Image (cartoon, grey):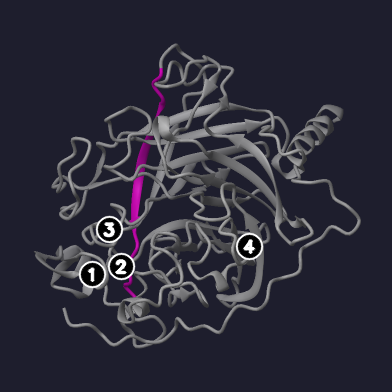
Amino acid sequence: MLRRIALIASAMTFFAQGALAQVPHRLTGWASQSSTLRTPGPVSGSFVTPNLGIVPPFVDGQPIPGWSGLLDNGDGTFTALPDNGYGSKANSSDYIIGVYTTEASLKTIGDGSNVPGNIENLAFSPFNDSLGLLNNGQGIDLLITADLPTYRSGNGFGVDSGIPVDPRITLERLLTGHDFDVESIARAADGSLWVGEEFGPYLLHFDADGTLLEEPIPHPFLQSPSNPLVIAQPGTETQAASRGFESIALNEAKDKLYAVPEAAPLNDVLRAVPGDERVVELFELDVATSSYTGVTFKYQKDGDAVDNAIVIGDITNVGGNKFVLIERDGFFGPAARLKRLYLIDLGVANEAGILEKLLLVDLLDIDDPDDIGGELEGVVEPDRFSFPFNSIESVVQLGDNTLGVAIDTNFPGDAGRRAGVPDDTELITIELEVPLASLSPAPLSPDAGVPPPAEPLAPDAGTAQLPPLAP
C-alpha cells in the first residue's frame, strides 16, 4: 500500500512540475494482423491510389485498414472498428463499414525475435440501414450508396463513377465509407453500439448486429466539409475535414456519453478558449434521450496554441469520472515525435476550468523489461519498445492496471514499423504498477470538483431535412 501511494504521489509531483515522467509500467503483450488479410465481400478499392507497392482494386475482398475503435468483450475477444476504409469520402464508396469480432494471441515473453503474436478475425458485422431511417423523410436524410445504381467517387456528393454498386450493398442497405466515416465506438448497457463519425460529425446508434436504430444525431454547431448541409451551402463548415468525433466514451454508469473532436473548431468564436487551438471540448450526451445536455469539459492538448498539429486519438473510461485519452501527432516511423496516453478526471480542473492531465505512457518510449519486442527497426535498447505509428486510435481498459492500445494503419499509406512496407494492424497491452482508478492528475483539494459547465450549446442547426439527390 505504501509503495502504491508513493508511486501515485511521485507521478503527480512530476506532472505538476511539467516534466515528461511516466507512470511506472511495462509492456505485457504484442500482436498483429497482416495488411495482406482480406475479408470476403465486394470488389473494393476502386478509387484508391497505388502506394507502397499496393495496387488496387482488391478483387479478393476488403482489406482491414487497422482499428479506429476497440471494445473488450470480456470473453477474450474484442469488437474492433475500422474507419471508412481508405481515408476519405472520395475513395471509399465501395468499402463496407462495420465491426469485427477479433481474438488476439498476444506474445507475452521475449523469444529473441521481433515477431509479434497473431490477431484472428472471427466475424464481421456490417453496418446497415435496413430499417430505412436514412430515407424516411425525418431527421437526417442521406442519399447513401445503397440507394444508387453506381458508386460515387470524389468529395461532396461525389460524381458518377459508372461502376455498378454491388447487389449485396443494395439488397441489405449496407453502409459504406462514402456514407459515414466511423471513427470511435462505445457499448451501451443494453449491448447496443454508439459510434462517432466525422462526415457530420454525427453520433450513430446501432444494435449489436450493426443495424442503425435511430436518426443520426448532429452536433449543435460542428459541421465538417462533408456535412450535407455544408455541401449544399459551401463555406459554412465549422470543423475541419477529418477532425470530427475520433473519440467517444461512456461514463462508468453508462448514462452519459462524451464525444471529443480531434481538434478545435475552425471558427475562433466557437472555440472553448478563443485564440487557443489546443483546447478541445468533451461534449456530453444523455443516452436516455439521445440528446446533448449542454454540459462540456475543456481539455488542453500538447503543442502550440496556434496551428496546433496534435489530435485526440481515442478516449476510454477507467472508472468513475476518470478517462484515458490518446494524444498524437500526424507522423510515423522516425518522424514520429508525440504519441502519449494521458489520464483525466472530470472532477479535477485548474482555475481556468481546463481539465488537469497526468501522463501515463509515452508510446514512443515504452518499458519492455521482458524484451517482448526484440530488435525493432529504430529501437536500440533491448528493454524499450516503440509504437511509432501515425494513427494510434484505440485505447481500452483490460484490467485494473492494464490498457490495450491499437492502431489505424491508413492502408496502404503508412509505413511506421518498417520503411517502405504497409503497416500491419498492431495491438499492445501495457500494465501499470498501480490501478488506473487510483491515479489522479492532481491532488484533490477541498474545493476541487466538477468544473462549471460551459455555456449551453447553440441551437441545433443541423437537423434540417435535405431534398433527395438525383443519382
Q: Is residue 117 magenta?
A: yes
* Residue identified by numbered label 2: 179
Where residue 20 sits in the image (x, y, percent)? 66, 34
| Figure quadrant of the N terminus | top right
Mark 3 or mark 1, which has the lower sequence index? 3
Q: Is residue 76 visible?
A: no
Sequence-earlier tag: 3 or 2: 3
Q: Residue furthest left?
A: 162
Q: Give whichever of discs 2 and 1 has the lower sequence position.
A: 1
Location of mark 3 (residue): 96
Position of residue 160 in the picture relative to residue 135 (left or right): left
Q: CA distance from mark 3 to mark 2?
A: 10 Å
Choose between 421 and 195: the one closer to the eye: 421
Going by the numbered disc 2, the residue's amino acid type is Asp
The reply to whether the C-beta atoms of the residues labelled 2 and 1 are less than 8 Å apart is yes
Q: Which residues are magenta?
A: 114-131
Q: Residues within 10 Å of mark 1 (few under 14, many from 20)?
A: many
Per the image, label 3 sits on a secondary structure element best described as loop
Please identify, in this view, whether the residue under mark 2 or under mark 4 is nearer the observer.
2
Q: Is residue 278 left or right of residue 16?
A: left
Considering only order in the chain, which callout, 4 or 2, is on the residue closer to the N terminus?
Answer: 2
Q: Residue furthest top?
A: 112
> SS class of the residue under badge 2?
loop
User: How far apart are the alpha carbons under marks 2 and 1?
Assistant: 7 Å
Residue at the (48%, 61%) spot, across then down? 245
> To which quarter of the image does residue 425 belong?
top left
Looking at the rendered structure, the secondary structure element under dot 1 is helix
Please tell me which residue is depicted at 29% across the width and 37% down the height of the picture: 35
- Sooner in the amino-acid sequence: mark 1 or mark 4: 1
- Residues under numbered marks 2 and 4 in contact, where contact means CB atoms less than 8 Å apart: no
Say what amino acid the circle numbered 3 marks.
Answer: Ile
* Residue 254 marker: 4
